[in-house]
Amino acid sequence: MSDIPREFVFTRYPARQGAVWLRMAYVLFGKHRAPWVVVFVGYSLITSVASFVPYIGGPLAAVAHPLLAVGILAAAWNEERGVPPALRHLLQGFHSNVWALIGVGAAFFLAMTLAVYGSFFIFGQMQELGGANAPKTHEELIARLTANPRLQLALLLSIVVSAVIWVISWWAAALVVFQDATAGAAIATGLRAAMANWRAIAVYLLALAMYGGFVPLAISVIVALVVPPPVLYVLVLALILPYILMFAVTMYVSYYVSYRDVFHANETLAPLSRGQ
């Protein structure tokens, strides 16, 4: 084998491509909505169970994230080739470069931890994270956020940086599985590709915030203005829950769409091998 490091080629896109990724993901999701919902619910249940393991739930869920993310990536890969998403695809990560994926997961956990604590440290708000001074209720947290602009900035920075790390982790997992990259090479390549496409990623994250935050909020406000309280909550749930589910699945599919667009631009589909 050659000792020369592999070069992973990627494409640099303008800002508007970030919105294209989300639109392409919705089209892919729309081809097999019900199977995609089943896969997403299965993924969510597994990650939820992992996160509730006593003492190690958080780190365990983070380290296992790339292994489970591969299931979503594999389902999208198969759907592009005419095979509907299925629950069996969620196990794909446990058969493909497992240790490299675990390495990506460990780096993901470390990066997310540093992103959160680092953001609060920069704005001098570390005392708000825990200890005796930590907010005890949701109402207290909202009150502190409303009254403390520095806390708002710390929270916003941690959300933005964490979102970028989340995207990079999906790209790194895809590079491990689809391009046989090592954990280090996958993370470094994902980071370089994200830096080269920061404008597209910024638009992509703004689109996620709009469709995942602003639209549901707007729907809730409009309904509250025209519907009496006795049926308000039932109607809001009936409208919002299906929308949130559809949005969440589209978002997860978009990680594969963005990876394929950045790292396999203009490539034709590979043939579907037996057993996929």
Image: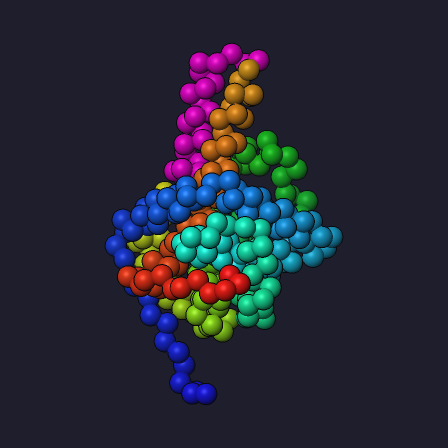
Of residues 181 and 111, the one drawn nearer to the viewer in this rendering: 181
Left or right side of 131 for 35: left
Position of residue 174 relative to residue 1, above or below, is above
Per the rendered image, the range of residues in magenta is: 209-230
Q: Position of residue 33 (x, y in %)?
A: 47, 40
Left or right side of 112 for 207: left
Q: Position of residue 270 (x, y in %)?
A: 38, 64
Left or right side of 182 for 11: left
Q: Residue at x 51, y 12 (%)?
A: 228
Q: Residue at x 64, y 34 (%)?
A: 137
Does residue 24 show up magenta in the picture?
no
Look at the image and name its color scheme: rainbow
Q: Position of residue 162 (x, y in %)?
A: 48, 53
Of residues 206 and 240, the one drawn nearer to the viewer in this rendering: 240
Which residue is most to the front? 274
Q: Position of residue 191 (x, y in %)?
A: 41, 64
Q: Quadrant of residue 99?
A: bottom right
Is residue 27 visible in the rendered image? The answer is: yes
Which residue is most to the right? 54
Q: Residue at x 44, y 36 (%)?
A: 213
Is residue 115 visible in the rendered image? The answer is: no
Callout count: 0
Of residues 51 and 90, the one drawn nearer to the viewer in this rendering: 90
Position of residue 154 relative to residue 185, above or below, is above
Does residue 228 show up magenta in the picture?
yes
Q: Residue at x 35, y 53 (%)?
A: 201
